[in-house]
Image (spheres, helix red, strand yellow):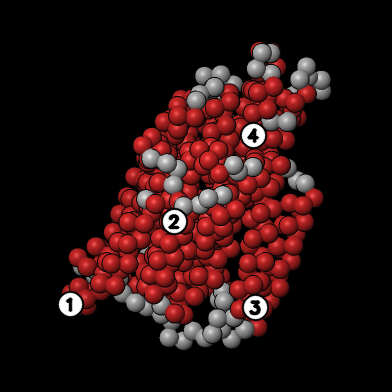
Amino acid sequence: MNTEISDIRAGRREWTGLAVLASVALLLSVDVSVLYLALPRLSADLGATASQQLWIMDVYSFMLAGFLVTMGTLGDRIGRRRLLMIGAAAFGAASVLAACSVNAEMLIATRALLGVAGATLLPSSLALIRNMFRDGKQMGTAIGLWYACFMLGMAIGPLVGGVLLEHFRWGSVFVMGVPFMVLVLVAGRTLLPEYRDPGAGRLDLASVALSLATILPVVYGLKEVARSGWDPVAVAAIIAGAAFGVVFVRRQHRLADPLLDLRLFANRAFAATIGIMLLGGIVMAGTTLMTTQYLQTVEALSPLEAGLWLLPQNIAMIVALTVAPAIARRVDAAYVMAGGLALGAAGLFLHTFVPSTGGTGLVVTGLVLASAGIALPMGVGSGVMMTVAPPEKAGSVASLSETGGEFGVAVGVAAMGSLGTAVYRGELPDRLPVEAARESISAAVTAAKDLPDVLELARAAFTTGLNTVAAVSTVVFVSLAVVTIAVLRRHDATA
Protein backbone atom coordinates (compact mmCIF):
# COMPACT_ATOMS: atom_id res chain seq x y z
CA MET A 1 0.00 0.00 0.00
CA ASN A 2 2.78 2.45 0.95
CA THR A 3 4.61 1.57 -2.26
CA GLU A 4 1.49 2.35 -4.29
CA ILE A 5 1.12 5.73 -2.58
CA SER A 6 4.77 6.63 -3.16
CA ASP A 7 4.43 5.63 -6.81
CA ILE A 8 1.77 8.29 -7.47
CA ARG A 9 3.34 11.07 -5.39
CA ALA A 10 5.25 13.71 -7.33
CA GLY A 11 8.99 14.18 -6.84
CA ARG A 12 11.60 16.85 -7.49
CA ARG A 13 11.19 16.70 -11.27
CA GLU A 14 7.46 17.39 -11.11
CA TRP A 15 7.82 20.29 -8.65
CA THR A 16 10.56 21.83 -10.79
CA GLY A 17 8.29 21.41 -13.81
CA LEU A 18 5.56 23.20 -11.86
CA ALA A 19 7.91 26.17 -11.49
CA VAL A 20 8.16 26.32 -15.30
CA LEU A 21 4.37 26.16 -15.68
CA ALA A 22 3.84 28.74 -12.93
CA SER A 23 6.24 31.11 -14.71
CA VAL A 24 3.93 30.93 -17.73
CA ALA A 25 0.94 31.92 -15.58
CA LEU A 26 2.98 34.73 -14.01
CA LEU A 27 4.03 36.12 -17.38
CA LEU A 28 0.57 36.01 -18.95
CA SER A 29 -1.01 37.88 -16.04
CA VAL A 30 1.79 40.48 -15.98
CA ASP A 31 1.34 40.91 -19.72
CA VAL A 32 -2.30 41.92 -19.18
CA SER A 33 -1.79 44.48 -16.41
CA VAL A 34 1.50 45.98 -17.60
CA LEU A 35 0.04 47.37 -20.83
CA TYR A 36 -2.22 49.85 -19.00
CA LEU A 37 0.85 51.88 -18.05
CA ALA A 38 2.49 51.61 -21.48
CA LEU A 39 -0.62 52.60 -23.47
CA PRO A 40 -0.21 56.40 -23.30
CA ARG A 41 3.44 56.27 -24.43
CA LEU A 42 2.99 53.73 -27.23
CA SER A 43 -0.15 55.54 -28.44
CA ALA A 44 1.79 58.79 -28.77
CA ASP A 45 4.68 57.03 -30.49
CA LEU A 46 2.50 55.13 -32.98
CA GLY A 47 -0.12 57.85 -33.44
CA ALA A 48 -2.92 55.52 -32.36
CA THR A 49 -6.45 56.91 -32.46
CA ALA A 50 -8.87 56.45 -29.56
CA SER A 51 -10.52 53.53 -31.38
CA GLN A 52 -7.15 51.91 -32.10
CA GLN A 53 -6.16 52.26 -28.45
CA LEU A 54 -9.26 50.31 -27.44
CA TRP A 55 -8.42 47.56 -29.94
CA ILE A 56 -4.81 47.42 -28.73
CA MET A 57 -6.16 46.74 -25.24
CA ASP A 58 -9.12 44.50 -26.09
CA VAL A 59 -8.00 42.32 -29.00
CA TYR A 60 -5.77 40.23 -26.72
CA SER A 61 -8.64 39.25 -24.43
CA PHE A 62 -10.98 38.72 -27.41
CA MET A 63 -8.64 36.21 -29.03
CA LEU A 64 -7.70 34.61 -25.72
CA ALA A 65 -11.34 34.00 -24.80
CA GLY A 66 -12.25 32.89 -28.33
CA PHE A 67 -9.56 30.24 -28.68
CA LEU A 68 -9.40 28.78 -25.16
CA VAL A 69 -11.95 26.02 -25.78
CA THR A 70 -10.38 25.08 -29.11
CA MET A 71 -6.83 25.02 -27.77
CA GLY A 72 -7.76 23.09 -24.64
CA THR A 73 -9.33 20.35 -26.75
CA LEU A 74 -6.53 20.48 -29.33
CA GLY A 75 -4.01 19.81 -26.56
CA ASP A 76 -5.93 16.69 -25.58
CA ARG A 77 -5.62 15.50 -29.20
CA ILE A 78 -2.08 16.40 -30.32
CA GLY A 79 -0.35 16.42 -26.93
CA ARG A 80 -0.40 19.01 -24.15
CA ARG A 81 3.37 19.47 -23.98
CA ARG A 82 3.60 19.78 -27.75
CA LEU A 83 0.91 22.47 -27.80
CA LEU A 84 2.62 24.27 -24.90
CA MET A 85 5.89 24.31 -26.86
CA ILE A 86 4.17 25.57 -30.01
CA GLY A 87 2.42 28.26 -27.97
CA ALA A 88 5.65 29.32 -26.24
CA ALA A 89 7.48 29.70 -29.56
CA ALA A 90 4.55 31.64 -31.04
CA PHE A 91 4.22 33.86 -27.97
CA GLY A 92 7.93 34.69 -27.98
CA ALA A 93 7.93 35.51 -31.70
CA ALA A 94 4.77 37.62 -31.41
CA SER A 95 6.26 39.48 -28.42
CA VAL A 96 9.28 40.51 -30.50
CA LEU A 97 7.03 41.61 -33.37
CA ALA A 98 4.84 43.62 -30.97
CA ALA A 99 7.91 45.37 -29.54
CA CYS A 100 9.03 46.26 -33.08
CA SER A 101 5.63 47.54 -34.23
CA VAL A 102 5.89 50.60 -36.49
CA ASN A 103 2.21 51.53 -36.49
CA ALA A 104 -0.98 50.88 -34.55
CA GLU A 105 -2.30 48.37 -37.08
CA MET A 106 0.80 46.18 -36.68
CA LEU A 107 0.54 46.30 -32.90
CA ILE A 108 -3.15 45.31 -33.01
CA ALA A 109 -2.30 42.35 -35.26
CA THR A 110 0.56 41.19 -33.04
CA ARG A 111 -1.58 41.58 -29.93
CA ALA A 112 -4.14 39.30 -31.61
CA LEU A 113 -1.38 36.73 -32.22
CA LEU A 114 -0.36 37.01 -28.56
CA GLY A 115 -3.96 36.26 -27.56
CA VAL A 116 -4.08 33.12 -29.70
CA ALA A 117 -0.70 31.99 -28.34
CA GLY A 118 -1.84 32.72 -24.78
CA ALA A 119 -4.87 30.50 -25.40
CA THR A 120 -2.51 27.59 -26.07
CA LEU A 121 -0.45 28.21 -22.92
CA LEU A 122 -3.07 28.58 -20.19
CA PRO A 123 -5.10 25.35 -20.60
CA SER A 124 -2.01 23.32 -21.55
CA SER A 125 -0.11 24.34 -18.41
CA LEU A 126 -3.09 23.71 -16.12
CA ALA A 127 -3.87 20.37 -17.80
CA LEU A 128 -0.26 19.21 -17.45
CA ILE A 129 -0.54 19.75 -13.69
CA ARG A 130 -3.32 17.15 -13.74
CA ASN A 131 -0.91 14.66 -15.35
CA MET A 132 2.13 15.50 -13.24
CA PHE A 133 0.39 15.40 -9.84
CA ARG A 134 -1.72 12.25 -9.54
CA ASP A 135 -2.00 12.48 -5.77
CA GLY A 136 -5.09 14.56 -5.00
CA LYS A 137 -3.50 16.53 -2.16
CA GLN A 138 -0.39 17.37 -4.15
CA MET A 139 -2.48 18.33 -7.16
CA GLY A 140 -4.51 20.73 -5.03
CA THR A 141 -1.34 22.35 -3.74
CA ALA A 142 0.12 22.62 -7.25
CA ILE A 143 -3.03 24.23 -8.67
CA GLY A 144 -3.15 26.65 -5.73
CA LEU A 145 0.46 27.69 -6.36
CA TRP A 146 -0.25 28.07 -10.09
CA TYR A 147 -3.19 30.39 -9.40
CA ALA A 148 -1.16 32.28 -6.78
CA CYS A 149 1.51 33.01 -9.40
CA PHE A 150 -1.19 34.15 -11.80
CA MET A 151 -2.53 36.61 -9.20
CA LEU A 152 1.00 37.69 -8.27
CA GLY A 153 1.51 38.70 -11.88
CA MET A 154 -1.61 40.87 -11.78
CA ALA A 155 -0.35 42.51 -8.59
CA ILE A 156 3.22 43.24 -9.72
CA GLY A 157 2.37 44.07 -13.34
CA PRO A 158 2.06 47.84 -12.77
CA LEU A 159 5.26 47.84 -10.70
CA VAL A 160 7.19 45.93 -13.39
CA GLY A 161 5.78 48.21 -16.05
CA GLY A 162 6.76 51.32 -14.11
CA VAL A 163 10.36 50.14 -13.74
CA LEU A 164 10.67 49.17 -17.42
CA LEU A 165 9.10 52.38 -18.72
CA GLU A 166 11.31 54.44 -16.45
CA HIS A 167 14.46 53.15 -18.18
CA PHE A 168 13.43 51.73 -21.59
CA ARG A 169 11.03 52.38 -24.48
CA TRP A 170 7.52 50.94 -24.44
CA GLY A 171 8.54 47.86 -26.45
CA SER A 172 10.33 46.53 -23.37
CA VAL A 173 6.99 45.49 -21.81
CA PHE A 174 6.61 42.95 -24.64
CA VAL A 175 10.25 41.81 -24.88
CA MET A 176 10.27 40.81 -21.19
CA GLY A 177 8.16 37.77 -22.12
CA VAL A 178 10.81 36.29 -24.41
CA PRO A 179 13.12 34.88 -21.65
CA PHE A 180 10.13 33.14 -20.04
CA MET A 181 9.25 31.47 -23.33
CA VAL A 182 12.88 30.43 -23.89
CA LEU A 183 12.80 28.83 -20.43
CA VAL A 184 9.70 26.83 -21.40
CA LEU A 185 11.26 25.68 -24.67
CA VAL A 186 14.56 24.66 -23.04
CA ALA A 187 13.30 23.09 -19.80
CA GLY A 188 9.93 21.85 -20.97
CA ARG A 189 11.15 18.81 -22.90
CA THR A 190 13.05 17.50 -19.88
CA LEU A 191 10.72 18.40 -17.01
CA LEU A 192 7.23 18.18 -18.51
CA PRO A 193 5.53 14.90 -19.52
CA GLU A 194 3.68 14.46 -22.78
CA TYR A 195 0.05 13.41 -22.66
CA ARG A 196 -2.71 13.09 -25.23
CA ASP A 197 -6.12 11.47 -25.24
CA PRO A 198 -5.61 8.14 -27.06
CA GLY A 199 -9.30 7.95 -27.89
CA ALA A 200 -9.69 11.46 -29.29
CA GLY A 201 -10.91 11.76 -32.86
CA ARG A 202 -10.25 14.44 -35.45
CA LEU A 203 -10.70 18.11 -34.67
CA ASP A 204 -14.05 19.30 -36.01
CA LEU A 205 -13.30 22.56 -37.82
CA ALA A 206 -16.99 23.50 -38.05
CA SER A 207 -17.20 23.34 -34.26
CA VAL A 208 -14.10 25.53 -34.00
CA ALA A 209 -15.75 28.14 -36.23
CA LEU A 210 -19.00 27.95 -34.24
CA SER A 211 -17.18 28.32 -30.92
CA LEU A 212 -15.45 31.46 -32.19
CA ALA A 213 -18.74 32.78 -33.59
CA THR A 214 -20.25 32.23 -30.13
CA ILE A 215 -17.57 33.60 -27.85
CA LEU A 216 -16.14 36.55 -29.79
CA PRO A 217 -19.43 38.46 -30.37
CA VAL A 218 -20.59 37.87 -26.79
CA VAL A 219 -17.32 39.12 -25.26
CA TYR A 220 -17.28 42.08 -27.67
CA GLY A 221 -20.89 42.94 -26.87
CA LEU A 222 -20.34 42.74 -23.12
CA LYS A 223 -17.28 44.98 -23.32
CA GLU A 224 -19.23 47.51 -25.38
CA VAL A 225 -22.09 47.44 -22.87
CA ALA A 226 -19.63 48.17 -20.07
CA ARG A 227 -18.07 50.98 -22.10
CA SER A 228 -21.04 52.64 -23.82
CA GLY A 229 -24.24 51.13 -22.42
CA TRP A 230 -26.87 48.99 -24.12
CA ASP A 231 -26.50 50.28 -27.67
CA PRO A 232 -28.01 48.33 -30.60
CA VAL A 233 -24.65 47.04 -31.92
CA ALA A 234 -23.67 45.56 -28.56
CA VAL A 235 -27.08 43.93 -28.07
CA ALA A 236 -27.03 42.53 -31.62
CA ALA A 237 -23.56 41.06 -31.04
CA ILE A 238 -24.67 39.33 -27.83
CA ILE A 239 -27.82 37.94 -29.47
CA ALA A 240 -25.84 36.72 -32.49
CA GLY A 241 -23.28 35.02 -30.25
CA ALA A 242 -26.04 33.35 -28.25
CA ALA A 243 -27.68 32.07 -31.44
CA PHE A 244 -24.41 30.57 -32.66
CA GLY A 245 -24.01 29.08 -29.17
CA VAL A 246 -27.26 27.16 -29.56
CA VAL A 247 -26.07 25.76 -32.90
CA PHE A 248 -22.70 24.88 -31.34
CA VAL A 249 -24.32 22.95 -28.47
CA ARG A 250 -26.59 21.01 -30.81
CA ARG A 251 -23.64 20.05 -33.00
CA GLN A 252 -21.65 18.80 -29.99
CA HIS A 253 -24.51 16.50 -29.03
CA ARG A 254 -24.51 14.94 -32.53
CA LEU A 255 -20.75 14.41 -32.94
CA ALA A 256 -19.00 11.21 -31.93
CA ASP A 257 -15.85 13.26 -31.11
CA PRO A 258 -17.12 16.70 -30.07
CA LEU A 259 -14.90 19.74 -29.67
CA LEU A 260 -16.40 20.19 -26.19
CA ASP A 261 -17.64 17.11 -24.36
CA LEU A 262 -20.89 18.36 -22.82
CA ARG A 263 -21.18 15.13 -20.83
CA LEU A 264 -18.80 16.75 -18.34
CA PHE A 265 -21.71 18.90 -17.16
CA ALA A 266 -23.71 15.79 -16.25
CA ASN A 267 -21.47 15.51 -13.18
CA ARG A 268 -23.13 17.63 -10.48
CA ALA A 269 -19.86 18.46 -8.74
CA PHE A 270 -18.29 19.66 -12.00
CA ALA A 271 -21.29 21.71 -13.13
CA ALA A 272 -21.81 23.27 -9.70
CA THR A 273 -18.13 24.16 -9.29
CA ILE A 274 -17.79 25.85 -12.67
CA GLY A 275 -21.03 27.75 -12.00
CA ILE A 276 -19.80 28.88 -8.59
CA MET A 277 -16.51 30.10 -10.02
CA LEU A 278 -18.25 31.90 -12.90
CA LEU A 279 -20.69 33.75 -10.63
CA GLY A 280 -17.94 34.49 -8.13
CA GLY A 281 -15.88 36.02 -10.94
CA ILE A 282 -18.83 38.15 -12.03
CA VAL A 283 -19.24 39.55 -8.52
CA MET A 284 -15.54 40.24 -7.97
CA ALA A 285 -15.10 41.89 -11.38
CA GLY A 286 -18.00 44.24 -10.69
CA THR A 287 -16.78 44.92 -7.16
CA THR A 288 -13.27 45.75 -8.33
CA LEU A 289 -14.66 48.09 -11.00
CA MET A 290 -16.83 50.01 -8.54
CA THR A 291 -14.26 50.26 -5.75
CA THR A 292 -11.46 51.34 -8.09
CA GLN A 293 -13.67 54.14 -9.40
CA TYR A 294 -14.66 55.07 -5.84
CA LEU A 295 -11.04 55.47 -4.73
CA GLN A 296 -10.13 57.66 -7.72
CA THR A 297 -13.29 59.74 -8.18
CA VAL A 298 -15.00 59.91 -4.79
CA GLU A 299 -11.89 59.81 -2.57
CA ALA A 300 -9.89 61.71 -5.25
CA LEU A 301 -6.81 59.48 -4.98
CA SER A 302 -4.22 59.40 -7.76
CA PRO A 303 -3.90 56.20 -9.82
CA LEU A 304 -0.68 55.35 -7.97
CA GLU A 305 -2.30 55.94 -4.56
CA ALA A 306 -5.33 53.87 -5.53
CA GLY A 307 -3.05 51.10 -6.79
CA LEU A 308 -1.15 51.03 -3.49
CA TRP A 309 -4.42 50.78 -1.54
CA LEU A 310 -5.36 47.76 -3.69
CA LEU A 311 -2.15 45.89 -2.85
CA PRO A 312 -3.55 44.41 0.42
CA GLN A 313 -6.40 42.88 -1.62
CA ASN A 314 -3.96 41.17 -3.99
CA ILE A 315 -1.75 39.95 -1.14
CA ALA A 316 -4.77 38.49 0.68
CA MET A 317 -5.84 36.63 -2.46
CA ILE A 318 -2.36 35.21 -3.09
CA VAL A 319 -2.05 33.99 0.53
CA ALA A 320 -5.54 32.44 0.49
CA LEU A 321 -4.89 30.70 -2.83
CA THR A 322 -1.71 29.20 -1.41
CA VAL A 323 -3.22 27.91 1.84
CA ALA A 324 -6.57 26.76 0.40
CA PRO A 325 -5.36 23.28 -0.63
CA ALA A 326 -3.73 22.74 2.79
CA ILE A 327 -7.02 23.59 4.50
CA ALA A 328 -8.86 21.23 2.13
CA ARG A 329 -6.69 18.34 3.32
CA ARG A 330 -8.28 18.63 6.76
CA VAL A 331 -11.73 19.99 5.95
CA ASP A 332 -14.16 18.80 3.28
CA ALA A 333 -13.74 20.78 0.03
CA ALA A 334 -17.38 21.89 0.13
CA TYR A 335 -16.95 23.53 3.53
CA VAL A 336 -13.71 25.24 2.48
CA MET A 337 -15.44 26.70 -0.59
CA ALA A 338 -18.59 27.66 1.32
CA GLY A 339 -16.54 29.19 4.13
CA GLY A 340 -14.63 31.29 1.62
CA LEU A 341 -17.86 32.50 0.03
CA ALA A 342 -19.23 33.40 3.46
CA LEU A 343 -16.04 35.34 4.23
CA GLY A 344 -16.35 37.11 0.89
CA ALA A 345 -19.99 37.93 1.65
CA ALA A 346 -18.90 39.53 4.93
CA GLY A 347 -16.42 41.73 3.07
CA LEU A 348 -19.01 42.73 0.47
CA PHE A 349 -21.52 43.46 3.25
CA LEU A 350 -19.06 46.02 4.67
CA HIS A 351 -19.24 47.86 1.34
CA THR A 352 -22.96 48.47 1.86
CA PHE A 353 -21.93 50.91 4.64
CA VAL A 354 -19.25 52.82 2.68
CA PRO A 355 -19.90 56.59 3.04
CA SER A 356 -19.45 59.23 0.35
CA THR A 357 -16.45 60.69 2.21
CA GLY A 358 -13.68 59.00 4.15
CA GLY A 359 -14.56 55.45 3.16
CA THR A 360 -11.14 54.27 1.98
CA GLY A 361 -10.45 52.13 5.07
CA LEU A 362 -13.83 50.41 4.85
CA VAL A 363 -13.43 49.78 1.11
CA VAL A 364 -9.96 48.26 1.54
CA THR A 365 -11.05 46.09 4.50
CA GLY A 366 -14.02 44.79 2.53
CA LEU A 367 -11.83 44.06 -0.50
CA VAL A 368 -9.31 42.13 1.60
CA LEU A 369 -12.06 39.92 3.06
CA ALA A 370 -13.82 39.47 -0.28
CA SER A 371 -10.60 38.65 -2.16
CA ALA A 372 -9.40 36.18 0.46
CA GLY A 373 -12.88 34.67 0.48
CA ILE A 374 -13.21 34.11 -3.27
CA ALA A 375 -9.64 32.76 -3.40
CA LEU A 376 -10.64 29.73 -1.29
CA PRO A 377 -13.19 28.32 -3.78
CA MET A 378 -10.84 29.29 -6.65
CA GLY A 379 -7.93 27.41 -5.08
CA VAL A 380 -10.01 24.32 -4.28
CA GLY A 381 -12.57 24.43 -7.09
CA SER A 382 -10.11 23.79 -9.91
CA GLY A 383 -8.89 20.69 -8.07
CA VAL A 384 -12.49 19.48 -7.73
CA MET A 385 -13.10 19.97 -11.45
CA MET A 386 -9.87 18.23 -12.42
CA THR A 387 -10.52 15.30 -10.09
CA VAL A 388 -14.11 14.55 -11.11
CA ALA A 389 -13.27 14.74 -14.83
CA PRO A 390 -11.41 11.95 -16.67
CA PRO A 391 -7.66 12.61 -17.05
CA GLU A 392 -7.94 12.57 -20.84
CA LYS A 393 -10.33 15.55 -20.64
CA ALA A 394 -8.01 17.72 -18.51
CA GLY A 395 -7.32 20.10 -21.39
CA SER A 396 -11.03 20.66 -21.99
CA VAL A 397 -11.63 21.18 -18.27
CA ALA A 398 -8.79 23.69 -18.01
CA SER A 399 -10.06 25.61 -21.04
CA LEU A 400 -13.59 25.71 -19.60
CA SER A 401 -12.24 27.04 -16.32
CA GLU A 402 -10.25 29.78 -18.05
CA THR A 403 -13.08 30.64 -20.46
CA GLY A 404 -15.44 30.92 -17.50
CA GLY A 405 -13.00 33.35 -15.93
CA GLU A 406 -12.90 35.51 -19.07
CA PHE A 407 -16.70 35.53 -19.27
CA GLY A 408 -16.97 36.25 -15.55
CA VAL A 409 -14.87 39.39 -15.88
CA ALA A 410 -16.73 40.58 -19.01
CA VAL A 411 -20.20 39.90 -17.58
CA GLY A 412 -19.29 41.32 -14.17
CA VAL A 413 -18.02 44.61 -15.56
CA ALA A 414 -21.03 44.93 -17.88
CA ALA A 415 -23.78 43.82 -15.48
CA MET A 416 -22.55 45.31 -12.20
CA GLY A 417 -21.28 48.42 -13.97
CA SER A 418 -24.70 48.91 -15.58
CA LEU A 419 -26.44 48.44 -12.21
CA GLY A 420 -24.13 50.96 -10.54
CA THR A 421 -24.67 53.47 -13.38
CA ALA A 422 -28.46 53.07 -13.24
CA VAL A 423 -28.50 53.74 -9.48
CA TYR A 424 -26.10 56.69 -9.92
CA ARG A 425 -28.34 58.36 -12.48
CA GLY A 426 -31.48 57.61 -10.51
CA GLU A 427 -30.05 59.27 -7.39
CA LEU A 428 -29.24 62.54 -9.14
CA PRO A 429 -31.87 65.33 -9.19
CA ASP A 430 -33.86 65.95 -12.37
CA ARG A 431 -32.02 69.21 -13.08
CA LEU A 432 -28.28 69.69 -12.80
CA PRO A 433 -26.21 72.81 -13.54
CA VAL A 434 -23.94 70.56 -15.62
CA GLU A 435 -25.95 67.85 -17.40
CA ALA A 436 -22.76 66.08 -18.49
CA ALA A 437 -22.37 65.01 -14.86
CA ARG A 438 -25.32 62.66 -15.35
CA GLU A 439 -23.30 60.50 -17.74
CA SER A 440 -20.93 59.01 -15.16
CA ILE A 441 -18.99 59.84 -12.03
CA SER A 442 -15.84 60.33 -14.13
CA ALA A 443 -17.67 62.81 -16.37
CA ALA A 444 -18.96 64.61 -13.28
CA VAL A 445 -15.47 65.01 -11.84
CA THR A 446 -14.26 66.45 -15.16
CA ALA A 447 -17.25 68.65 -16.02
CA ALA A 448 -18.09 69.95 -12.52
CA LYS A 449 -14.62 70.28 -11.02
CA ASP A 450 -15.37 73.92 -10.09
CA LEU A 451 -18.88 73.21 -8.77
CA PRO A 452 -18.48 71.60 -5.32
CA ASP A 453 -22.24 71.20 -4.80
CA VAL A 454 -22.62 69.18 -8.02
CA LEU A 455 -19.55 67.11 -7.16
CA GLU A 456 -20.96 66.33 -3.74
CA LEU A 457 -24.25 65.17 -5.29
CA ALA A 458 -22.41 63.03 -7.86
CA ARG A 459 -20.15 61.41 -5.28
CA ALA A 460 -23.07 60.64 -2.99
CA ALA A 461 -25.02 59.15 -5.94
CA PHE A 462 -22.08 56.99 -7.00
CA THR A 463 -21.56 55.77 -3.44
CA THR A 464 -25.21 54.71 -3.32
CA GLY A 465 -24.59 52.76 -6.51
CA LEU A 466 -21.58 51.07 -4.91
CA ASN A 467 -23.67 50.23 -1.81
CA THR A 468 -26.37 48.71 -4.03
CA VAL A 469 -23.91 46.61 -6.06
CA ALA A 470 -22.39 45.42 -2.77
CA ALA A 471 -25.81 44.41 -1.42
CA VAL A 472 -26.63 42.39 -4.55
CA SER A 473 -23.16 40.81 -4.48
CA THR A 474 -23.58 39.84 -0.82
CA VAL A 475 -26.82 38.02 -1.62
CA VAL A 476 -25.12 36.20 -4.54
CA PHE A 477 -22.21 35.03 -2.36
CA VAL A 478 -24.48 33.84 0.46
CA SER A 479 -26.63 31.95 -2.07
CA LEU A 480 -23.53 30.37 -3.61
CA ALA A 481 -22.35 29.25 -0.17
CA VAL A 482 -25.67 27.48 0.43
CA VAL A 483 -25.57 25.83 -3.02
CA THR A 484 -21.98 24.71 -2.41
CA ILE A 485 -22.90 22.91 0.80
CA ALA A 486 -26.01 21.36 -0.75
CA VAL A 487 -24.30 20.04 -3.90
CA LEU A 488 -20.68 19.36 -2.95
CA ARG A 489 -20.71 18.27 0.69
CA ARG A 490 -20.61 14.56 -0.24
CA HIS A 491 -17.74 15.08 -2.68
CA ASP A 492 -14.38 13.47 -1.91
CA ALA A 493 -12.41 15.97 0.18
CA THR A 494 -9.09 14.96 -1.39
CA ALA A 495 -10.13 16.82 -4.55
Q: Nearer the viewer, residue 63 or 408?
A: 63
Label 1 sits on residue: 3
For discs 3 and 4, the disc positioned in front in the rendered view: 3
Q: CA distance from mark 2 to mark 4?
A: 42 Å
Residue 467 image-quadrant placement: top right
Q: Secondary structure at mark 4?
A: helix
Residue placed under numbered mark 2 in the picture: 95
Residue designated by label 4: 468
How many angstroms separate mark 2 from mark 3 (CA)?
30 Å
Give the CA distance from mark 4 to mark 1. Answer: 56 Å
Question: In the picture provided, is 402 more to the left or to the right than 159?
Answer: right
Disc on res. 206: 3
- Asked whether the beta carbons under mark 2 and mark 4 sit within 8 Å of each other, the answer is no
Is residue 307 shown above or below 66? above
Distance CA(mark 3)–CA(mark 4): 43 Å
Tell me the residue at 27%/66% (across/down): 187
Near-viewer residue (39 or 254): 39
Residue at the (43%, 56%) spot, across then down? 96
Q: Circle 3: is it few (<14), some (14-19), or many (20+) Cα within 10 Å?
A: few
Q: Nearer the viewer, mark 2 or mark 3?
A: 2
Q: Kindly tell me whether residue 241 is visible in this rendering.
A: yes
Name the residue: 41% across, 77% down: 79
Nearer-N-terminus badge (3/4): 3
x and y percentages locating residue 435 in the rendered image: 78, 23
- CA separation, marks 1 and 3? 47 Å
User: Label 1 vs label 2: CA separation?
Assistant: 46 Å
Q: Secondary structure at mark 1?
A: helix
Disc 2 residue type (three-letter) = Ser
